[in-house]
Amino acid sequence: MEKPLRNSLSISGAFSGFSRLKLFGALSRTPHGLIDMSAPMLAALVWHGGFPSWRVILLGLITVFAGYTAVYALNDVVDYREDREKARLGAFEPSGSDLDAVLIRHPMAQGFLSFNEGLIWAMAWGAVAFIGAYLLNPVCMLIFVIASALEVIYCLMLRVSYLRVLVSGAVKSAGALAAVFAVDPSPSPLFLVVLFAWLFLWEIGGQNVPNDWTDLDADRRQGARTIPVAFGAKASARIILATLSGAIALNAALMALSPAGFSGAVIAMAAGVGLCLLLIPALRLHFRPAPARAMALFNSASYYPLTLFILVLINILFL
């Protein structure tokens, strides 16, 4: 195993024996991944209008967990050299405000996991996701393969173009699309388009651009091509506002297209969730641009699909 870049004694001691599993959890951003799982669960509920069979629920949960675990780890595997350089630049100093750093940011890059360990971890969970997706619906398997390939392309575009943000949006939308095909082999094409566009805009404005904003200094020194590096703070804030406003509008359209027949009150509550978790933090960032406010937006936006999932679940169960 490679020598850790800093704090080697304290961190190695804290993650010895069975507790080393926490390092693999950090590699896959498991705390964030568990939250992200709500997006495909939400998509399945909104389109199906209720609960699918127990087989689909159990197999779907295993597959979704495996898929997010594999793809997040794949990001670190492909970005290994770039992340090592960022670590040397001090970009991964501990921060209690970063949802992606609840455990440790990029443990491979900091030397606490070897490259081979990370690769095997990503491949093992990828195999589980591949098999589970096939059993749910071969279309789900195809979507997982495409999303994995796009994740590799996204990583390789770091120094190439800020348009990599579009690839990121497609990757984040893939899980929800697969979930719809898991509960219905012939879903509405219009619903799929709106679902894709909704999560695409949420990922750009609520996840990708704010997260890149927090790494702005290191990305500039590294020669990375991101939206904040290419366009600066003011333009990035406008892009965030525009995409998140679009996401809130598309969410209303998505729920209106659902066979569940959501009431106007439920759709209005969903819009209120978007206002609180997306638009208000984005406006704060717009009027006072700062990395801390970008991180605050990233964290609050991360809970957006989960909060909507809870809202829809309550509606299906009790209303």
Image (cartoon, rainbow, N blue to C red):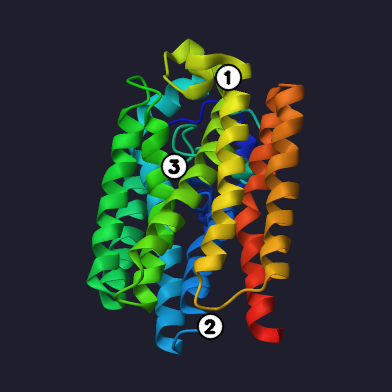
Quadrant in which residue 68 is drawn: bottom left
Q: Position of residue 165 (x, y in %)?
A: 42, 33
Q: Amino acid at mark 2?
A: Gly
- Contact, mark 3 vs mark 2 (Cβ under 8 Å): no
- Do the residues under discs 1 and 3 have CB atoms within 8 angstroms? no
On the image, the x and y values in percent for residue 248 come to 61, 50
- Answer whether residue 1 is visible to the viewer in this image: no
Q: Position of residue 239 (x, y in %)?
A: 56, 29
Residue 234 placement, left or right of 64: right
Q: CA distance from mark 3 to mark 2?
A: 42 Å
Reading the image, the residue beneath label 1 is 235
Label 3 vs 2, first from the N-terminus: 2
Mark 3 or mark 2, whichever is nearer to me: 2
In-image side of 165 versus 254 (left or right): left
Q: Which residue lies at the image location 46% right of the left edge and 46% below the top edge?
A: 200
What residue appears at the point 37 percent right and 25 percent down from the top-left corner?
Answer: 158
Tag in front: 1 or 3: 1
The residue carrying mark 3 is 113
Q: Residue at x 33, y 63 (%)?
A: 189
* Mark 1 vs mark 3, CA separation in Å: 37 Å
| Residue name at image x 67 percent, y 78 percent | 315
Seen in the picture, residue 129 relative to 173 is either above or below; the reply is: below
Q: Which mark is residue 283?
A: none
Q: Is residue 298 above or below residue 92?
A: below
Amino acid bearing label 3: Leu
Residue under pointer 2 = 50
Q: How many marks?
A: 3
SS type, badge 2: loop
Looking at the image, is 61 positioned above or below residue 236?
below
- Counting residues from the start of the chain, the first of labels 1 and 2 encountered is 2
Element assignment for label 3: loop
